[in-house]
Amino acid sequence: MVKIRIVLFVTAVLLVVLLFSLPRTVVDNAPESLGASAGAQMNAAPIDGATSADQHTNDPLAIQEINRLRDLFLNNLNTEKSIIFADSLAMVFRKANYYDSAAHYYALLAERKASNEVWLRTADAYYDAFGFAMDARKRMELAGSSRDFYNKILEQDPGNLNVKAKMAMTYVSSENPMQGITVLREVLAEDPENQQAILNLGLLAITSGQYDRAIERFQRLIEINPDDVQAVFYLGYCMIETGDRKKAVEYFKKAAQLNPDQQLRAAINNYLEILN
């Protein structure tokens, strides 16, 4: 099960959430049509797609802020201020790692303010929500939404290889998963040191049990950037899978020294506790 789940996570944070079953989970929002009008979407309750603020967090201040911004957004649907409030809501949800709700608001923002910057934020939020989703159908829908927005960016900026490498991973949950591998290889053919593509190929190697190949990918990342905490972390994970517990401990200790974020640090500490 872990191998199946890892492919969904193209960042260390998302991998950590699944590996350790952290209590925070993103809500499984009902899909919204991006082509629908803002007014039609606002008829769906509640505004973030499925849940009320207190289902996202138990923090009273966060609940108060979410509800305040939602009310402001609803009361300004037909004004320029709606852009500001949609953006603010998306940022609040994204900061709390509730990417599906963040994606919902970014998508509403994108309807009002089309730009590569907004499309990228929307695509990334759907991309991260896709990583959290455990239902196969939902995962495919979120991946498709993410891919749609990445494609908008690539139409304007076809040379954006990092976007192309991320988009490649959305094919994993599509009817043509091998297309993702093809796209990643295209990226590396153009830029052999593209870290996003190398990372993604390393993750895909893990899912297929090709740990030697995965280790090669992550070691290559470290050659390019010795402070790549994700690569070091994944090397530790691969060492566990290949039976080299001593080496795994070395990598996890090194990752701990590279200023990982809170969730990744929790995962590192958890592994070290198990291995020691």
Image (tube, rainbow, N blue to C red):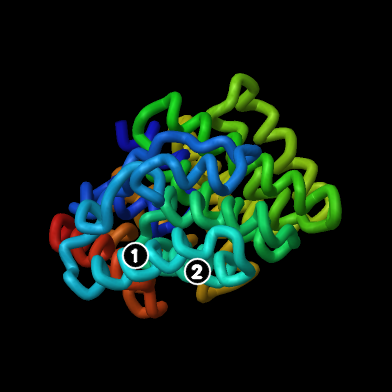
Q: Which residue corresponds to the image point at 63% horizontal and 69% vertical from the top-left?
A: 80
Is residue 247 at least partly visible in the picture?
yes
Q: Residue furthest top?
A: 175
Instruction: Tell me: residue 178, above or below residue 5.
Output: above
Q: Which residue corresponds to the image point at 70% horizontal and 43% vertical from the top-left?
A: 184
Q: Position of residue 25 (x, y in %)?
A: 27, 49
Q: Is residue 216 left or right of residue 182?
A: left
Q: Amino acid at mark 1?
A: Ala
Task: Indicate the secondary structure of the residue bearing disc 1.
Answer: loop
How packed is label 2: few (under 14 Cα within 10 Å), some, or many (20 or more)?
many
Q: Is residue 231 left or right of residue 83?
A: left
Q: Nearer the viewer, residue 174 or 266?
A: 174
Q: Nearer the viewer, residue 134 or 65?
A: 65
Mark 2 / mark 1, whichever is N-terminal: 2
Disc 2 to disc 1: CB gap under 8 Å: no
Instruction: Tell me: residue 257, above or below residue 44.
Output: below
Residue marked by disc 2: 85
Residue marked by disc 1: 96
Q: Amino acid at mark 2?
A: Phe
Q: Is residue 113 left or right of residue 145?
A: right
Q: Position of residue 215 (x, y in %)?
A: 50, 50
Disc ID at residue 253? none
| Total residue callouts | 2
How packed is label 1: few (under 14 Cα within 10 Å), some, or many (20 or more)?
some
Q: Position of residue 228 (x, y in %)?
A: 51, 69
